[in-house]
Image (cartoon, rainbow, N blue to C red):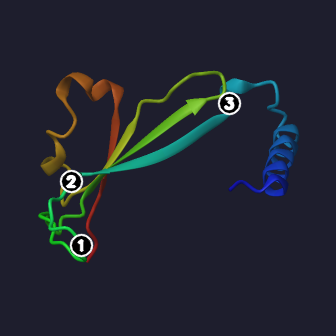
Amino acid sequence: MVNPVVLQRCFTDLNEILGELDISNKPSVIWNCDETRKPFEHDLVKILAPKGARSLVGRTTANRTNLTTMACVSAEGNVMPPMFVVKSKTSRSCKNLILKQHQKDVCGHIKKKVG
């Protein structure tokens, strides 16, 4: 549940920062970004089991690889091309992830495995 005191403080702080930076009336320089992830592995939707079963075995792999998408929108309504982040050893192994026809509309980042 949202705490009204915390929420009010957030808007008070935001108003203060916008005033300090003198950007209250400049929506083209105010941007919001958010990320979301989508696992490459499917999500189980339904499992059939005997009535009263306490534990079930699901048929999934240990693969925890995700595709992370970053979206940015300005207060004026402008959008940046989406950014995709994937884990890979080399950029060449991801070259087919972004379709050729959309390459000018997206940017990508390869998160290399460390160690």
Percent x, y of residue 78 = 56, 22
Percent x, y of residue 85 = 33, 49
- Residue marked by disc 3: 29
Whichever of labels 2 and 1 marks the residue nearer the N terminus, that label is 2
Question: As shown in the figure, which amino acid type bears the numbered disc 3?
Answer: Val
Viewer-side label of 1, 3: 1
The label number, if any, that marks residue 35 in the structure image: none
Mark 1 closeness class: few <14, some 14–19, many ≥20 residues within 10 Å: few
Q: Secondary structure at mark 3?
A: helix
At 19% across and 40% down in the image, what residue appears? 97
User: Height in image: 95 above or below 104?
Assistant: below
Percent x, y of residue 54 = 25, 77
Mark pair 2, 1: CA separation: 16 Å
Mark pair 3, 2: CA separation: 46 Å
- Residue marked by disc 1: 52
Viewer-side label of 2, 1: 1
Question: As shown in the figure, which amino acid type bears the numbered disc 2?
Answer: Lys
Viewer-side label of 3, 2: 2
Contact between marks 1 and 3 (CB within 8 A): the answer is: no
Whichever of labels 3 and 2 marks the residue nearer the N terminus, that label is 3
- Residue 31 lies in quadrant: top right
Taking the image as shown, residue 61 lies to the left or right of residue 76, namely left
User: Height in image: 101 above or below 72?
Assistant: above
Percent x, y of residue 113 = 26, 67
- Residue marked by disc 2: 46
Contact between marks 3 and 2 (CB within 8 A): the answer is: no
Tag count: 3
Mark 3 closeness class: few <14, some 14–19, many ≥20 residues within 10 Å: few
User: Height in image: 103 above or below 5?
Assistant: above
- Residue 57 lies in quadrant: bottom left
